[in-house]
Amino acid sequence: MAQALPPTAALVALTGALRYHGATAHRLGEVLRIRTLSRHGTDVRVGIGSSITVAAATASAQIPPPGGVLTMTRDQAADRLARLPVGALHGIGPRQAAVLRDYGIHSAGLLAAVPPATVRRLLGGRAGRLAADRARGIDPRPVAPAPCPPPPR
């Protein structure tokens, strides 16, 4: 199942494909990268993780250009997330990151250690809950297939 994220990203749920192909997620990521490069001449960064936040916002953002594959297991995700600046977390904008930094919360690890109720007070109800969850690698959003937008003219 794939979900386009215009203009330059896509999410792919591999759960069923792993069993079908008898391969690991990392191996399927390598195949995707090679096929994209050979068929379209475009190298891609493939982030593989246990949630959208870990895969899209963290793993793929840590791959240096032009492309590559990075897999983060659940065990690795907490450690890697902890080292990121708060502004690198998916869904935390510049203003929210500035507010957190003003309170001495510079990394996702520090944000994960702050009680969620405190983060909600700093950023507001929904935004605070999302930020606290994302810092812990929690992202229950499913990959939702949608038609691809038409190419730019």
Image: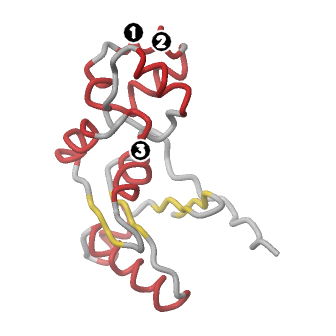
The residue at the point 77 percent across, 70 percent down is 150
> How far across and down, in percent of the image, does residue 121 sit?
47, 8
Q: Nearer the viewer, residue 145 or 116?
A: 116
The disc at residue 53 is 3
Tag 2 near tag 1, CB within 8 Å: yes
**Residue 4: x and y, percent?**
61, 61
Which three-letter amino acid code belongs to the residue tagged 1? Thr
Residue that appears at 53% across and 23% down:
127
Please say if 140 is above or below 150: above
Of callouts 2 and 3, which one flags the residue occurring earlier in the amino acid sequence?
3
> Gap between marks 3 and 1, in whole Å?
21 Å
Q: Residue at x 43, y 49 (%)?
A: 57
Tell me what residue is drawn at x 34 percent, y 72 percent.
68
Amino acid type assigned to the residue bearing label 3 in the image: Thr
- Where 139 falls versus 44 (above or below)? above
Foreground mark, 3 or 1? Answer: 1
Percent coordinates x, y for residue 82 in the rendering? 25, 36
Residue corresponding to mark 2: 122
Side of 153 relative to 103 (left or right): right
Name the residue tied to disc 1.
Answer: 118
Q: Amino acid at mark 2?
A: Leu
Tag 2–tag 3 contact (CB < 8 Å): no
Of residues 121 and 18, the one nearer the viewer is 121
Q: Could you tell me residue 118's position as x and y percent?
A: 39, 9
Q: Relative to the observer, which residue lies in front, 87 or 46?
A: 87
Name the image quarter holding residue 60: bottom left
